[in-house]
Image (tube, rainbow, N blue to C red):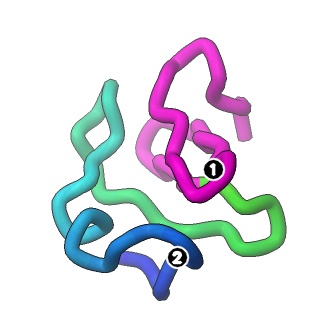
Amino acid sequence: MTDRVPGIDPKLMEILRAPGTHAPLRYDAEHNELVDDKAGLAYPIRDGIPIMLPDEARTL
């Protein structure tokens, strides 16, 4: 699913899912985002907090 995400508890990453598809997320270290490959969206991480709002997601 993902490698270790800086600032986010690994246990949280195990249960965290994409809001629209409920798919597992992978970490994109280059952009500091959580990626939902199923929906083609990337959610930003700001100050160690994943911003899981569709309006904040970047289309891939």
Count of numbered marks? 2
Quarter of the image with the N terminus in it: bottom left
Q: In the picture provided, is 19 more to the left or to the right than 2?
A: left
Residue at 59 percent across and 37 percent down: it is: 41
Amino acid type, residue under disc 1 in the picture: Ile
Pointer 2 with pointer 1, Cβ within 8 A: yes
- Residue 45, numbered label: 1
Count neighbours of disc 2 (C-alpha within 10 A) and say few if under 14, some if 14 to 19, many if 20 or more.
some
Dividing the picture into quadrants, the one containing residue 9 is bottom left
Q: In the picture provided, is 37 more to the left or to the right than 48?
A: left
Count neighbours of disc 1 (C-alpha within 10 A) and say few if under 14, some if 14 to 19, many if 20 or more.
some
Q: Secondary structure at mark 1?
A: strand
CA gap, disc 2 and disc 1: 10 Å
Amino acid type, residue under disc 2 in the picture: Val
**Of callouts 2 and 1, the N-terminal one:** 2
In the rendered image, the residue lying farthest to the front is: 47
Give the camera-side residue of 24 and 46: 46
Q: Which residue is mark 2?
A: 5
- Residue 37, numbered label: none
Q: In the picture provided, is 44 more to the left or to the right than 15?
A: right
Residue at 47 percent across and 48 percent down: it is: 36
Dividing the picture into quadrants, the one containing residue 32 is bottom right
Q: Position of residue 28 (x, y in %)?
A: 66, 68
Q: In the figure, 59 relative to 46: above or below?
A: above
Q: Position of residue 58 (x, y in %)?
A: 72, 32
Q: Secondary structure at mark 2?
A: loop
In the rendered image, the residue lying farthest to the bottom is: 3
Q: In the figure, 31 relative to 41: above or below?
A: below
Residue at 44 percent across and 68 percent down: it is: 8
Q: Magenta stretch: residue 50 in it?
A: yes
Q: Which residues lie in the magenta part?
A: 34-60
